[in-house]
Amino acid sequence: MSWLQYLHPPMLTRRTLRVWQRNRNVFVKTFRVNFLPPLLEPLLYLLSLGYGLGVFVTQINGVSYPRFIAPALLAISIMNAGFFETTYASYVRMYFQKTFDAIIATPLSIEEVITGEILWGATRSVINASIMLPVLIAFGVVDLPISFVIIPFAFLAGFLFASIGMCFTALTPNIDTLNLPTFLFITPMFLFSGTFFPLSILPMPIQVIATAVLPLTHVVKITRMITLSQVTPAILVSLAWIIIVAAVLFVLAVNLMKRRLIV
Amino acid sequence: MGDVIVAEDLEKRFGDFVAVNRVTFSVREGEVFGFLGPNGAGKTTTMRMIQCVSPKTSGRLEVFGMDVNTHPADIKCLIGVVPQETNLDPDFSVHENLMVYSRYFDIPPRTALETIGSLLDFVQLSERRDTSIEKLSGGMKRRLILARALINNPRLLILDEPTVGLDPQARHLIWDRLRALRSRGNTIVLTTHYMEEAAQLCDRIVIMDQGRILELGRPQDLVQKHAGVDIVEADNKPEVLACLGRMGAKYDVAGERVQVFTEKAREVTAALLQECSPIEVVARPAGLEDVFLKLTGRRLKE
Ligand SMILES: Nc1ncnc2c1ncn2[C@@H]1O[C@H](COP(=O)(O)OP(=O)(O)OP(=O)(O)O)[C@@H](O)[C@H]1O
Ligand SMILES: [Mg+2]
């Protein structure tokens, strides 16, 4: 019974957006610094992997290598933006800056603070995807106009990764142990989710595991269907997976944070 | 006038540890109510329960007639908080801190701008409007936190050690501001380690120790009750103690000193000087600190 208490739905008001606004204000203040990584990242990957390694890997399933990895680069950037916002960045705000303490002395509740943080993480994913997409368009490695669908989709996927990140933040004893989920979860996912080579070449058990538990697998599947204009009904399965897991982990993140912060 | 805070058998446990042990008190509208107590007495814990950020373990706690468990947002709309630990937002400047904070209370931007202007004047930080938080001195940060606590024009102000670490000028400025707020009818609850602060500002105080309330009352009444009018101090030497014993005086030993609580300081001093040949005798009016040390003991806490 006791784990059920962690699925208690949060009570939210419009004030949740105040937390989002706070983070947005900080982001706007430091925009020039925040702007560069999502701009440079696809360039570096496309040049080194797409056009470097791509000389040897000419085609995958009839798709040129740069076009194969372009949607994966988007998915990875969406993942990183959401995940790192609610892990390191939220941890710093929570623990070092005492920002959450300051906010819950106002009419906002801790549930609203955590939800606002996660919504902001999802927004970071949207921002990253929006900065990256024009670069990929310039290289001509994504189809148009369908690829613009990635931008709203980035919010959903970002929400999922931000919720995952917040669960780890709620459980981590200190900021150094946040490296563990990064190395044990994010890095393997970065490599084994059908990002740089198709999942189908891996042994069946690993394929099954990747599809069952690695969120990035589903995100890459969807972004790739979109940028290659190859949308099939399978997109619904991945969408459903993402929505259900995001909803559960969001509620879990809020409750784990309540357990951590309400003493 | 009604009671702003009513606490009855209020208890807070952290696991097995009882931090606040069934305390009962009420704070009247318009008064300055102080919590005194050694480190770890449970002052901050009590403040945090009143602020609705730390749930009570048992007992009754109402603020403005509302239960802290059921109406946290409504209560938090009506109070302003100066926390013990400075938690200004380091990502923003002085002005931005107040602006962002005003949004948490849904204050319209235009109103907020006006309020912030006058609050910065009130705490004498107008010149620092665009300074980033790291560049403020400790005293400026405390003043800014006070301004932040006033942003929603709160009916109840809760201050947890508002003047900790401040120089006398900054402390007096804050005291002055708190008096101004009281005269506007605000209710103020504060905790402090400075007896002078409590004596100067508070209409009523409680003295807490180890989670319990030891005394509640007006500062001057508590001094009268526990320390008398005056105190005569002399060196703690066997001859002096024996001599005091012969005189039939009631005394307390306080480390290297021995203290006599009395209403006849002059006579006691004269007698001591004549009969007991101590090295040094000091007579002074009794104060809150004497009450505090008498009630909570002289041992270092924790
Ligand atoms: N989150 C917590 N978990 C466990 N124990 C706690 C927690 N918060 C406070 N305590 C304990 O409760 C007791 C009361 O702490 P509190 O902070 O209320 O004291 P205080 O009167 O404000 O002291 P100070 O004057 O040092 O600020 C202390 O013994 C403290 O160690
Ligand atoms: Mg304290």
Image (cartoon, coloured by chain):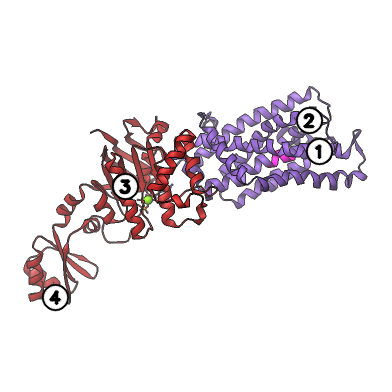
Chain colours: A purple, B red
Q: Which residues are magenta?
A: A76-80
Q: Which residue is mark 4?
A: B239
Position of residue B262 measured from the top left corner of the image (x, y, whole percent): 11, 61
The answer to whether marks 4 and 1 sit on the same chain is: no
Dot 1, how many residues are within 10 Å of its Cα: few (below 14), some (14-19), or many (20+)?
A: many
Q: Name the residue nearer the viewer: A77 or B11.
A: A77
Please report contact status of discs 3 and 2: CB closer than 8 Å, yes or no.
no
Is B159 situated left or right of B126 in this image?
A: left
Q: Is residue B27 visible?
A: yes
Q: Which residue is mark 1?
A: A136
Position of residue B230 measured from the top left corner of the image (x, y, whole percent): 14, 61
The answer to whether marks 3 and 4 sit on the same chain is: yes
Disc 3 residue type (three-letter) = Leu
Most frequent secondary structure within the magenta stretch = helix
Q: CA distance from mark 1 to mark 3?
A: 60 Å
Disc 2 residue type (three-letter) = Ser
Counting the numbered discs, the total is 4
Q: Quadrant of residue A252?
A: top right
Q: Which residue is mark 2?
A: A147
Q: CA distance from mark 3 to mark 2?
A: 60 Å
Q: Which residue is mark 3?
A: B178
Disc 1 residue type (three-letter) = Leu
- Which chain hosts label 3? B
